Amino acid sequence: MSTLDQFAAALADLRRSQAAGRLAHAYLVHGPVRGAALTLAEALLQFLFCHAAAPPCGVCAECRGVARHTHPDILWLEPESKSRQIVIGADEQEGIRKVIRFIALTPFSGQHKAAVILDAERMNAQAANAFLKTLEEPPPNSLILLLSEAPQMLLPTITSRCQKIDLSAEPVAPGAWLEPLLDWLRVGPAADPLDAAVRAGGLRRILAAEKKLIEDTERAAPGNADLENEVLDARISAKYLNVRAALFQSVLHWHRDVLLRTLHLADAPYLFPAEATAQQRQAQQRTPAGALADLRRLETLIRRLEQFPAASEQALLGLGLLPEDLGRR
Ligand SMILES: [Zn+2]
């Protein structure tokens, strides 16, 4: 079964469980945490929280709140940026303690209280142990979604208390976007703000073309003809997010190569060995420290972009933030 089939099946399954009043209190979603797994979490939460006659409508305040990660009854938790761990938290304002408290509160708007934990395997032992009790005796109407690309790293006591949804898949192979992306990367950092805006436009066009390709392919696929619109939309969105994550991974790989080239390592494990000339030219314009700073900033930007896909992609790319930031040294 492909990821997309897994995705559609999982969503349909969750909806049947909900209709029958048999939704579990905790799910462990195994898959790309900023791709299909996140999309599935958002789709399920929109379905749960939307008040429309045929949920999710995608446009009401509830649906938009879910998509923007601003819904008052949903808590999103991910590893701390510094330690890259999910910690227990000093008090009820942070870490797992915040989740435990939040999930037990009375819902503001809907009938549910939900928490989504991204990269759940990053929970340290103390946090995991504190969380066990909540998983064993979940408050009524609570829903916990653990998203993880490496669920084998979670404590068995945690995983055994969750229903599993498998959206794991082979990494996305570079597609039609790779050549235009390499063209874009070869040009190097923007020289001035106008140049940066032009560069942002270039990246936006690559992403837009890829999205259109996915949409056209999915809508034309014979097997998809009888799918409900929203399931098809969710599939398209999941596939696009996976491709976009792969594309940004390539951008990171390029900058990792440039960093190695500032160090003049002849036989380093370059990820784009055929791009030596363009990368060397870019490496000559910066110090190793500068190249490392670029890489770090880029990682942060991509994490932010992927954390709030619906709301911030347009905004970030529209502002030219990504390429402009890349261009700054
Ligand atoms: Zn809605």
Image: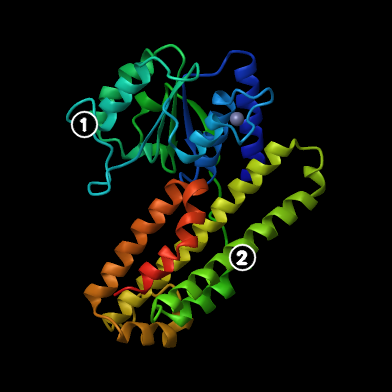
Mark found first going from the N terminus, 2 or 1 = 1
Q: Please say if 237 is above or below 285.
A: above
Residue on which disc 1 sits: 89
Q: Is residue 42 left or right of residue 224?
A: left
Can residue 1 be seen at all in this image of the molecule?
no
Q: Please say if 59 is above or below 27.
A: below
Label 1: element kind: loop
- Residue that sits furthest to the left in the current view: 90
Residue in the picture at 25% in, 29% down: 127
Image depth: mark 2 or mark 1 in front: 1
Front position in the image: 129 or 84: 84
Can residue 195 be seen at all in this image of the molecule?
yes
Residue in the picture at 34% in, 40% down: 78
> Do the residues under discs 2 and 1 have CB atoms within 8 angstroms?
no
Q: Is residue 110 left or right of residue 124?
A: right
Residue in the picture at 29% in, 74% down: 291
Front position in the image: 177 or 4: 177
Q: Amino acid at mark 2?
A: Gly
Front position in the image: 13 or 211: 211
Residue 226 picture location, percent across and down: 81, 38
Q: Which mark is residue 318?
A: none
Residue 290 picture location, percent across and down: 25, 74
Q: How is the image coloured?
A: rainbow
Residue on which disc 2 sits: 175
Residue 224 picture location, percent across and down: 77, 43
Q: Report the quarter where the C terminus lies.
A: bottom left
Label 2: element kind: loop
Residue 235 picture location, percent across and down: 65, 44
